[in-house]
Amino acid sequence: MEEAKKRCEELVRRLNEASDAYYSGKEEVMSNYEWDALFDELSALEEETGYILPDSPTQNTGAQEETAQGERERHEFPALSLAKTKQVSELVKWTQDKEIWLSWKLDGLTLVATYDRGALTRLLTRGNGTLGTNITYLKDSIRGLPEKIRYQGHMVVRGEAAISYPDFERINATMEDDEKYANPRNLASGTLSLDDPEKVKERHVYFNAFTLVYIEDNIVSWGERMDLLEREGFRVVERERLAAQTLPDAVERWTKKVENGQMDLPVDGLVICFDDTDYAASGSVTGHHASRAGLAFKWKDVSAKSELLYVEWSCAASTISPVAVFEPVQLEGTTVSRASLCNISEMERLGIGKTCTLEVIKANKIIPKCIAVTKAEGEIEIPDQCPVCGAQTEIRISPRSLTRTLHCTNPDCSAKHVKKFTRFVSKPGMDIDGLSIQTMLKFMNEGFLSEFADIYHLSDHAQVIRQMEGFGEKSCENMMRAIEKSRNVHPVNFIYALCIPMFGVDAGKKIVASIGVEGFLERLEAKEGFEDIDGIGPEKSNSVMEWYESGHNAAALQRLLREVEIEKVEPPKEEGGRCRGLNFVITGEVRRFKNRDAFKAYVEEQGGKVTGSVTGKTAYLVNNDAESASSKNRKARELSVPVISEDEFLEKFGPGSGDEVL
């Protein structure tokens, strides 16, 4: 008995430490797979011995979130956690043959939003279920959370703040040192602890409403309540109405969506609830669970064992991260052969050896993760050279978490400047589809990319790229086509793509309108500066000259110029640009211009303006679908604003005939 009690105490300590890291966005200390196994062991021991500690995770909702700002406040309605099961038969039994709803169990941070008289008045984290932290100051930074609604009564809505997998990968790829997060859930938690609303906004946190907790109107149906939230502009969790007998088939269908990669948002299971909210509220409360509020279904993690082939070191931002490459295994219906090892500390925690057997799962059925190591022999060599630039590496220890990470010491390593490559390929830049941050980092680690001009030689590596994970014949072909198309570039886009500090689209327009791109390049070489140009001034002029004269920028620019052709654009004439004094609105698909930005640039070069909405000052609405019932078309008809097609625009204001003008 004493031995069982000691084991309970040890399990409570370990599980609470892991929960604290999980809920606070800290370095992960164990996987969900390990946590669930220890939790199940603790539950069984507590039932067997009757020995239950007050701080046992079986009696609590979890650790309290840490936030940078905000006061702790009491919830109007306790945010209880759901009981969980891994057995579909338990789900069916729980329904009692009543009508139910199935929805996702999103893996994020639960928030509670309160509305009064149509306005969002309070936003709390769940905290411990009784007390949460007030983060109303972030209400403008969280997407999918309307600040104003039509309903004028008192309303309380609960939802999950989550970050999608693509955004998680995008953000994590640019983080340095110990800033990286283990999963989207930790990133969402860490993001909502920031005291900078603009930074939070940049990270694309979405509020996904999963239940309407309270409303003054007598709406008993959970489904009707969710429909109301959707009409009010909330982003609402996907849901399906079911009878108990169809539940097993539905669980299988929904599980396949995750296994087949159809989910961008992180989910760690499913939830069922009764449609009759009065019946759901009539249950008892045991510990921190309401017996009829809902039941969560968590998938059983399937693991597989494989032999480590080697550890690959991949550079992202300034951090060089280890990736385990192993003999391919089948997991959750897919072939898996790689899993991130995060950092040196995680490798040491697992006990990775030069040869060893790995146990691997797909966390949340998505992310391959190594959870255990056996038969380890020998030591992994930590590289002393960066895989991208070959510079010396160094090991750094985070003062916050004591995590050991590997870094490149070269400040000019291209992997450290991947954000610049992102700007280069963006729509306002060279407009190249198919080159995400993750893709470009892969190419950098393969040695394909070190400067902008290298993008135009990726075709030399097409055979290798087709064989890389995440690529195939079609995606490689589409990327190469987009690269070739970008060789012909508008001068404003070209200047923006160079990533000159303080030089955005507006500065590029002023340069092109005044001296053209030829004058821009001539002045750079002659070191004459641009302070005489209206809207540039000495600060921006000094910035561009310092950029040109520092490092290898001048030589890199010359190499890039050999790869692209900059379109000839006539500056607007002082008298009588073709669109001079006219306001245009452009909507719908464009066909004759390369894209809408190119269309807008042409109008502005010809002395006109492009605005986003139709008003009494609008001269023309350009829409290739003149009969469309769109709001802009309707507004144009109300104000007697002419609606013209692209062809009609070119007849009136264009330089002449041609299949594509810009």
Image (cartoon, helix red, strand yellow):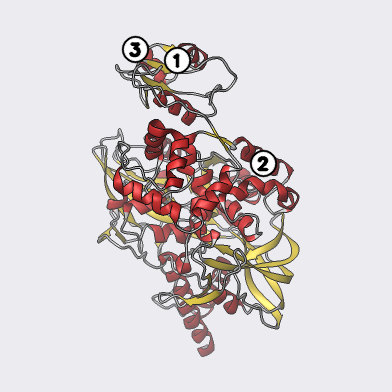
Mark 3 and 2 residues: CB-CB less than 8 Å, in contact? no
Amino acid on which the number 3 mark rests in the picture: Glu
Which residue is the site of mark 1? Answer: 653
- Specify few, some or many for label 1: CA neighbours under 10 Å numbering under 14, 14-19, or 20 or more: some
Instruction: Please indicate whether residue 107 sits to the left or right of residue 382 in the image.
Output: left
Which residue is the site of mark 3? Answer: 638
Please name the residue shown 55% across and 28% down the image.
594
SS category of the residue bearing label 2: helix
Q: Earlier in the sequence, mark 3 or mark 2?
A: 2
Q: Earlier in the sequence, mark 2 or mark 1?
A: 2
Which of these two is toward me, 411 or 478? 411
Mark 1 and 3 residues: CB-CB less than 8 Å, in contact? no
Q: Quadrant of residue 629?
A: top left
Q: Tell me, for residue 480, which label it has, or none.
A: 2
Whether residue 484 is situated above or below residue 395 in the rendered picture:
above
Observer able to see residue 52: yes
> Residue 108, how many percent across, how many down?
46, 56
Which of these two is toward me, 132 or 592? 592
SS category of the residue bearing label 3: helix
Query: Looking at the image, is mark 2 or mark 1 nearer the viewer?
Result: 1
- Specify few, some or many for label 3: CA neighbours under 10 Å numbering under 14, 14-19, or 20 or more: few
Q: Label 2 to label 1, Cα distance in Å?
A: 34 Å
Which residue is situated farthest in the front direction here? Answer: 526
Q: Label 1 to label 3, Cα distance in Å?
A: 24 Å
- Specify few, some or many for label 2: CA neighbours under 10 Å numbering under 14, 14-19, or 20 or more: many
Mark 2 and 1 residues: CB-CB less than 8 Å, in contact? no
Please name the residue shown 52% across and 55% down the image.
418
Q: Label 3 to label 2, Cα distance in Å?
A: 45 Å
Instruction: Please indicate whether residue 624 sits to the left or right of residue 225 in the image.
Output: right
